[in-house]
Image: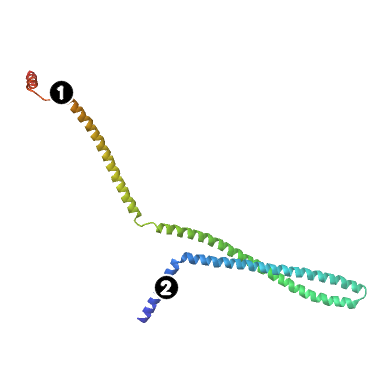
Amino acid sequence: MFKQFMTLARGHVTDSSTSVLDANAMTLLRQQMRDAAKGVAKSRKSVAVVMAYAEREKAALTRIEAQIADLETRALDALAKEREDLASEAADAIARLEIERDTTRNAVTTYETQIVRLKACLAESEGCLREMKQGQHLAEAKDKAQRLSGSMPSGIMNDLKDAEFTLKRLQERQEHAEATADALVELSVADNADDLVKRLAEDGCGTSLNPDGTSVLERLKKKAAD
């Protein structure tokens, strides 16, 4: 049982750690990118330092070789003048310089080999950093878009639908009100016309509007004739 509790506790710790990392993923990524950029800059500086050492050794090699050539010429001249003592001193100096020359050549070769390897590593690191920066920009853009999307109220579509329904009802009521107003105008015109006809009829202008005995008798005679 105790072992199960320990396992459960480790599980909670792992879940909690994962949640923290997920919640701060962008901050973590930005810091990791800064660290990577510093590492690449440091590597670039290291390559520059090694190249500077190599150039210094090359210059030393050129100087040593020039000294050897000059001493050889002077030693030959000393032998020609039967100054073997001077020629012997020159030979000893040349021997020492040749040892130094070989050591310097080996140093130059080592530096050049290191430069090739470091440049290859640097190029790979810089390429990886460029790709990571592009990925970082994309991730930041997606994160901003998701944050913007998440800031929208969850019920906004329902609110828009309700507003649309209210607007439709309002427009219908306005149309009904306009139709009613038009009908009232028509009724008013008709009432005015009917009132005028009634007044004209009462004054004896035209036929009477109210039936009387004479008009009824005439209508019956006409019906009987048919």
Q: Is residue 226 visible?
A: no
Q: In this picture, is 202 found above or below 1?
A: above
Give, as a three-letter code, the residue at label 1: Ala
For mark 2, does the 10 Å Cα neighbourhood hold few (<14), some (14 to 19), or many (20 or more) residues?
A: few
Residue at far front of view: 203
CA separation, marks 1 and 2? Answer: 103 Å
The quarter of the picture where the N terminus appears is bottom left
Is 147 displayed left or right of 164 in the figure?
Answer: right
Q: Residue at x 26, y 40 (%)?
A: 177
The residue tagged 2 is: 14
Image x and y of residue 162, in percent: 31, 51
Please tell me the numbered disc located at residue 74.
none
Q: Residue at x 84, y 70 (%)?
A: 70
Instruction: Kindly identify the residue that appears in the image at 90 percent across and 77 percent down.
Output: 84
Of 207 and 62, which appears nearest the observer? 207
In the rendered image, the residue lying farthest to the right is 81
Locate residue 74 relative to residue 44 in the image: left or right. right
Q: Are marks 1 and 2 in contact (CB under 8 Å)?
A: no
**Mark seen at residue 201:** 1
Secondary structure beneath label 1: helix
x and y, in percent, of residue 16 in the image: 41, 71
Amino acid identity at mark 2: Thr
**Element under label 2?**
helix
Q: Quadrant of residue 223?
A: top left
Q: Position of residue 148 (x, y in %)?
A: 42, 57
User: Is residue 52 visible in this depiction of the protein?
Assistant: yes
Foreground mark, 1 or 2, reads: 1
Quadrant holding the C terminus: top left
Please tell me which residue lies in front, 25 or 6.
Answer: 25
